[in-house]
């Protein structure tokens, strides 16, 4: 107890003595803790993202680090469960002295980590999780998100669907039974009903997370024949559902809408039929029509493919954004303070309103709520034969600012108040 | 006429096709120790099971001190004053002999306090004396799993006595004991029973014991009480000599 | 709900029940003989599925006919039985037969934890989906709804054959009779000179192989990914307990009950779907504490 | 001083000094102690020869009860503990009334079924329970004081330690009391118990409710330390973990429950930190090693060690409970 008090007193004295504005010495290394799924179903996102993080850190270090400070990365497995995550998170921050944390994939974990990061006074970048609830239900100084959230992601898909298939009448949903599956359907259905009030929901299925079999749901859907079937599932669940549906002709019968299927294109291979509407949680696509041909994008995609054997998916692009934002924030903070190593407050100031570019259109971090504003790319699958898996055609890229809930508003209220003419008002860039 | 301690009326029990008791009437008077004899498989143990509610009769009724107990579970009959010792001793094998008795006291007194240590109950001395009575004082602190079958049978009886019953049912109380000690033990037991005003019913194969320690004898054969009387009458009966004693001798 | 929907629900229920039965039957067989509830059974199921999906994928990718997937399933099951089942019984379970059931259960729980990680080390985290065996058999159309022949016909037929085969094996063959004898009264079986160690080993290998076969059969219909074993083991526990421990025919009935209940729930009240197996189990055990076909253990005094 | 008194005293002292000597371990130890309390509940049932593969149910129910209470303005740590314990007691009574009719595998399986039903409900009733992501449990006040993170965590640690010692003492006394002794006879001879005029079901129910309350208090402590409750609290793997810890510590030993929980948490966290890919494998191997080579668990090892250092007869009692429980043969079950 005594040592602890003494310790905090010293820290306090140091802080007061040096003053917030005074320059800090450059550390030997910039320590980053990255929480990602190394085990469990979500490791389909987590492991490629870890590979990307390692690649990016090596790349940055090869160029001399950030202002000469090399990056040092340690990983935490989100798959080990909430307790292990928070314990390890604390250990990295309090004992290993991590300077900045990237955490994490699971929305549940983000909800748990955000207040912890605030308590620990460590800058936390939510580099992949999509729940809009974090910033709508809480107000944080130390927490930022370097990509968009569920509302923008869902809204883009609704708009794409209404622009390409305006005449459908019925819809059914098959989502994983957890926060993402439920929340995304809440947003999607609220937005859809606001913009197309006559639509009828003819089936709502929330099979258990990781369900190995959807036969019964598929029989039920085959008998109901909805015009559109939505599933925001991902990973093994999505693959299983799509394969089983394709085997039994359901994909021929209904228009499939799969907002996360960009991450499963390669895994599904020839099993994903033509004509399925696919999104990738942002403007993420290994053949991004505006990015292909730029040197940085092409070399990243090919070296990632070479390194890991697979094309990058959206979680990889999200990791790139977290690193690009880091570089940009340090650059800006050091420009502000005259080139010396920034302290946390300066870095936070730099993150607020930061603009940076990952592997898509530029992203900005809103000053008001630290939320990233990111463009959205939606397309339709085609088995063109160019790759051993489906690629996208008829792509649209939506500008993020119009689709992101305004600061201080609740997403559900905001999308619920949209009107049918919103569909016409939004004009995305279209590609063949 | 005073109310009998225990009364069975028209008991009938069948297991599948086998009749273990066929319209049995039997009364047990307070203070009159009854021995039940009969060939193996005649249904003697089944009778004890019915009297204590372990098995429900197909037909008939059981009364304890005038109250019908036919459909009560064993624990409720025990609570009314019937205790039982078993052919195979039923003890808490991980506990010591003394602990087994102390647990019985706990049960009898219905003590609920979570902070009272079982071993600190005021009846400790009384239980040690009870163990001494059945000749097991020297093994009081040993887990019963380590004791001989004979010692366990005696502790089993002591546990039943610790409940302070009105009626004690015993199934071959001395079967595990060396024959030289049988009489000695029965001597102590019967003295203890009369001192505590407990009536005993015991199933017994040893006719010497029956002769010396029973006030009455009932002969159980083929699911019926065939004969009833004093030890002298019964043991001299030709049917008994033929069906029961003959078998025992063989 | 109209008649055709009810029939559709029945088809789904039967096909699901067939898969669950294949796993539960091995579990109940092992319990009947060894008196051990094998938590690692779910892992054996998962490994059977992984083996079939990965080798099958490689075989098809190498240009061989997908029909090879069917013999491959049997090979995968045999591999699981011999390479995993035998060592688990010989090296671990044999040491703990005399110990309390808590410890026995925990030993299999430990094996389960180890095998879960071993799966990830061997097969990684990415899901496998290898359905050429299923595609080979094509679809059947019923009331305008397509079913795969594999699920609608093959799985129930295999489950039925397994049930009949096991019955014949246990009643007609010498080995089967030995197993039955040990199940019914192990002390008596020992006393007449039956080598119980051998019977235990054979039973465990057979049970493990059935779990592997269950996984192999399931693999074309589903994504094989980490965690499928944990889901399956809890479900087959429910089946086995509903049926009565050690009851093979009972497991078939209970699997059918749970399969039909589950698909009925999907049609009528999708939110209750995951609850159905446990609700059925509770309802059955409330009325019959020993399970549908279990016999109460008589207490002798 | 006698070494047999000295070592427990030193152990408690060491625990009391954790926040000063190893502040980084403080949160981990809070969780370990909280789990230790929950495991005491499982240990209690093991003393009656019953193993529950579903006690995470009560852990989860209490944690959710506390989270709901916290969300509805009953926002005080001690109130939360009370609400959680009450929730666990009521559900323990309701579930107990049903499961005490069963023994052995069926007892374990039915507990499993109840916990799985509760788990499914938590996952399914998303709009009420937050589904798989669970509910936030914001840091509660303590007797009207709103504390910052550091003092709150310190207080929570000492509260966990005090509860561990207090409840451990109570559980030990309870087991030694007439009710507790009758409860333990369910393991060895229910026939005799019935013939002592005692209902085995009723006596088992008392212990069952107590075990539920212990699990519940552990659950509330973990929930407040974590700041979140999720369905994983009630999942069967968690129940298995609790049985695992009980065996690790020493079957049926109350101090073993705490020692086991501390050892488990440390192994688990370091396995997760240094062998992130294979932490389950490490734990599984650890469990196997304990069962095969030290079936009486940590307390058995400790007892053997003590006998070597300071041989004496009085340790017999300790050994009896753990060693005999471990070698209990199958015949005893029927």
Image (spheres, rainbow, N blue to C red):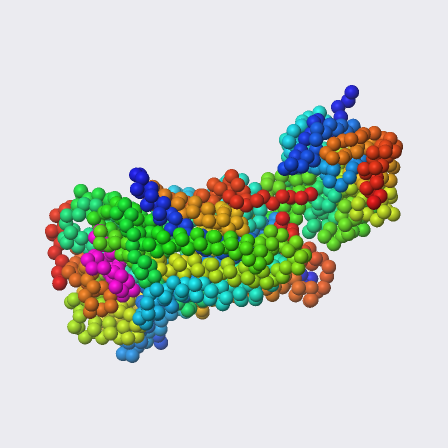
Residue D185 % position (x, y): 65, 46
Locate residue B161, reporting x and y percent. 76, 39
The C terminus of chain A, quarter of image: bottom left
Q: Which residues are magenta?
A: A254-281
Front in this rendered view, residue B48 or D247: B48
Q: Position of residue B172 (x, y in %)?
A: 78, 42
Residue ID at (31%, 54%): C148
Q: Residue at x 55, y 57 (%)?
A: C173
Look at 13% across and 60% down and name the residue there: A430
The answer to whether A64 appears left or right of C256 in the picture is left
Q: Does residue A162 appear to the left or right of D227 in the view shown?
A: left
Q: Is residue A262 magenta?
A: yes
Query: Between residues A365 and A386, which one lies in front from this camera angle?
Result: A386
**For the view shown, which residue lies furthest in the top direction?**
B1
Q: Magenta stretch: residue D50 in it? A: no
Q: Quadrant of residue A131?
A: bottom left
**Direction front: furthest residue:** C172
Q: In the figure, is residue B193 to the left or right of D66?
A: right
Judging depth in this view, the residue of A304 and D75 nearest the camera is A304
């Amino acid at each position: 107890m005594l040592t602890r008090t003494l310790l905090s007193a010293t820290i306090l004295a140091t802080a007061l003595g040096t003053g917030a504005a005074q320059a800090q010495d450059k550390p030997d290394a910039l320590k980053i803790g990255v929480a990602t799924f190394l085990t469990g179903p979500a490791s389909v996102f987590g492991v490629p993202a870890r590979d990307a993080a390692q690649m990016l850190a090596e790349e940055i270090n090869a160029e001399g680090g950030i202002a000469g400070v090399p990056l040092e990365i340690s990983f935490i497995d989100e798959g080990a469960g909430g307790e292990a995550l928070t314990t390890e998170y604390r250990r990295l921050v309090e004992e290993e002295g991590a300077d900045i944390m990237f955490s994490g994939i699971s929305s549940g974990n983000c909800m748990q980590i955000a207040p912890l990061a605030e308590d620990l006074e460590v800058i936390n970048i939510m580099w992949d999780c999509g729940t809009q609830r974090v910033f709508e239900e809480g107000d944080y100084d130390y927490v930022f998100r370097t990509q968009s959230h569920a509302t923008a992601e869902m809204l883009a898909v609704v708009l794409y669907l209404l622009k390409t298939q305006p005449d459908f009448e019925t819809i059914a949903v098959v989502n994983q039974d957890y926060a993402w599956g439920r929340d995304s359907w809440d947003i999607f259905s609220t937005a859809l009903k606001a913009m197309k009030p006559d639509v009828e929901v003819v089936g709502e299925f929330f099979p258990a997370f990781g369900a190995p079999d959807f036969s019964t749901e598929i029989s039920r859907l085959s008998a109901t024949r909805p015009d559109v079937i939505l599933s925001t599932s991902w990973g093994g669940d999505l693959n299983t559902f799509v394969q089983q549906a394709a085997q039994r002709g359901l994909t021929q019968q209904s228009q499939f809408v799969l907002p996360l299927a960009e991450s499963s294109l390669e895994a599904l291979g020839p099993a994903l039929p033509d004509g399925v509407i696919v999104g990738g949680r942002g403007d993420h696509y290994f053949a991004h029509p505006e990015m292909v041909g730029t040197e940085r994008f092409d070399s990243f995609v090919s070296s990632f493919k070479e390194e890991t054997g697979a094309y990058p998916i959206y979680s990889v692009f999200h990791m790139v954004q977290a690193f690009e934002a880091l570089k940009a924030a340090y650059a800006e903070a050091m420009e502000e303070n005259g080139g010396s190593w920034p302290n946390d407050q300066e870095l936070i100031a730099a993150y607020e309103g930061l603009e940076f570019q990952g592997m898509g259109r530029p992203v900005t971090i809103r000053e008001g709520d630290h939320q990233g504003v990111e463009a959205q790319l939606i397309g339709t699958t085609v088995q063109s034969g160019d790759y051993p898996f489906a690629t996208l055609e008829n792509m649209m890229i939506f500008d993020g600012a119009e689709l992101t809930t305004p600061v201080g508003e609740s997403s559900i209220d905001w999308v619920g108040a949209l009107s049918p003419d919103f569909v016409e008002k939004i004009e995305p860039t279209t590609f063949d | 006429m005073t109310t009998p301690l225990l009364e069975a009326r028209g008991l009938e029990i069948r297991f599948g096709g086998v009749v273990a008791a066929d319209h049995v009437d039997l009364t047990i008077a307070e203070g009159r120790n009854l021995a039940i004899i009969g060939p193996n498989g005649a249904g003697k143990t089944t009778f004890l099971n019915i009297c204590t509610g372990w098995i429900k009769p197909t037909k008939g009724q059981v009364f304890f001190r005038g109250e019908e107990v036919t459909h009560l579970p064993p624990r409720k009959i025990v609570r009314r004053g019937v205790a039982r010792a078993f052919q195979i001793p039923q003890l808490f094998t991980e506990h010591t002999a003394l602990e087994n008795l102390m647990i019985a006291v706990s049960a009898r007194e219905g003590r609920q306090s979570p902070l009272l240590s079982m071993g600190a109950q005021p009846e400790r001395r009384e239980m040690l004396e009870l163990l001494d009575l059945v000749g097991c004082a020297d093994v009081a602190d040993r887990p019963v799993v380590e004791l001989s079958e004979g010692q366990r049978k005696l502790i089993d009886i002591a546990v039943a006595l610790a409940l302070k019953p009105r009626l004690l049912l015993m199934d071959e109380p001395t079967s595990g004991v060396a024959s030289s000690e049988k009489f000695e033990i029965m001597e102590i037991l019967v003295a203890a029973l009369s001192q505590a005003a407990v009536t005993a019913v015991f199933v017994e194969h040893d006719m010497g014991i029956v002769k010396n320690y029973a006030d009455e004898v009932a002969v159980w054969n083929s699911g019926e009480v065939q004969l009833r009387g004093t030890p002298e009458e019964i043991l001299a009966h030709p049917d008994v000599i033929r069906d029961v004693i003959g078998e025992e001798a063989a | 709900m109209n008649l055709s929907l009810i029939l559709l629900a029945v088809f789904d229920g039967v096909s699901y029940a067939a898969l669950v039965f294949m796993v539960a039957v091995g579990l109940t067989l092992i319990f009947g003989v060894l008196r051990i509830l094998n938590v690692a059974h779910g892992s054996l199921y998962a490994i059977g599925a992984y083996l079939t999906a990965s080798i099958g994928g490689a075989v098809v990718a190498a240009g061989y006919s997908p029909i090879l997937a069917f013999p491959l399933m049997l090979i995968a099951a045999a591999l699981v039985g011999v390479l995993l089942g035998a060592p688990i019984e010989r090296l671990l379970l044999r040491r703990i037969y005399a110990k309390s059931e808590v410890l026995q259960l925990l030993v299999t729980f430990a094996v389960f934890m180890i095998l879960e990680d071993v799966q990830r080390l061997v097969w990684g985290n990415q899901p496998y989906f290898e359905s050429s065996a299923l595609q080979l058999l094509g679809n059947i159309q019923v009331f305008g709804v397509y079913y795969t022949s594999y699920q609608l016909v093959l799985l129930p037929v295999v489950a039925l054959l397994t049930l009949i085969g096991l019955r014949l094996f246990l009643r007609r063959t010498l080995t089967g009779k030995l197993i039955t004898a040990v199940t019914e009264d192990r002390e008596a079986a020992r006393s007449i000179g039956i080598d119980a160690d051998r019977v235990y080993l054979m039973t465990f290998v057979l049970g493990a192989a059935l779990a592997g076969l269950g996984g192999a059969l399931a693999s074309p219909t589903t994504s094989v990914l980490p965690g499928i074993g944990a889901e399956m083991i809890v479900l087959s526990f429910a089946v086995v307990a509903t049926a009565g421990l050690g009851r093979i025919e009972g497991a078939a009935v209970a699997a059918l009950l749970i399969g039909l209940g589950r698909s009925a729930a999907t049609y009528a009240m999708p939110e209750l779907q995951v609850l159905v197996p446990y609700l059925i189990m509770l309802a059955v055990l409330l009325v019959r504490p020993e399970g549908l076909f279990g016999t109460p253990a008589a207490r002798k005094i | 001083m006698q070494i047999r008194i000295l070592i427990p005293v030193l152990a408690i002292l060491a625990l009391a000094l954790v926040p000063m000597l190893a502040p980084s371990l403080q949160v981990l130890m809070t969780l370990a102690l909280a789990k230790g309390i929950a495991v005491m509940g499982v240990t209690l049932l093991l003393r009656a020869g019953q193993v529950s593969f579903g006690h995470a149910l009560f852990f989860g129910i209490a944690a959710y009860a506390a989270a709901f209470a916290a969300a509805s303005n009953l926002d005080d740590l001690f109130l939360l503990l009370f609400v959680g314990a009450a929730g666990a007691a009521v559900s323990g009574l309701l579930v107990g009334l049903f499961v005490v009719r069963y023994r052995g595998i069926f007892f374990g399986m039915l507990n499993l079924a109840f916990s799985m039903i509760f788990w499914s409900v938590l996952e399914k009733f998303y709009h009420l329970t937050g589904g798989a992501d669970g509910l936030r449990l914001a840091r509660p006040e303590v007797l009207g004081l709103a504390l910052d993170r550091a003092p709150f965590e310190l207080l929570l640690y000492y509260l966990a330690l005090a509860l561990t010692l207090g409840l451990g003492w109570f559980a030990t006394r309870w087991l030694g009391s007439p009710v507790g002794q009758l409860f333990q006879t369910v393991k060895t001879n229910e026939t005799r118990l019935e013939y002592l005029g005692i209902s085995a079901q009723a006596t088992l129910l008392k212990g069952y409710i107590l075990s539920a309350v212990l699990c519940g208090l552990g659950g509330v402590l973990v929930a407040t330390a974590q700041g979140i409750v999720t369905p994983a609290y009630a999942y069967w793997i968690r129940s298995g973990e609790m049985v695992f810890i009980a065996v690790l510590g020493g079957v049926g030993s109350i101090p073993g429950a705490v020692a086991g929980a501390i050892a488990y948490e440390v192994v688990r966290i370091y396995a997760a930190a240094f062998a992130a890919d294979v932490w389950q494998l490490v734990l599984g191997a650890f469990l196997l090693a304990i069962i095969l080579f030290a079936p009486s668990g940590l307390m058995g090892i400790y007892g053997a060690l003590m006998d070597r250092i300071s041989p004496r007869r009085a340790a017999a009692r300790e050994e009896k409970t753990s060693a005999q429980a471990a070698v209990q043969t199958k015949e005893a079950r029927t």
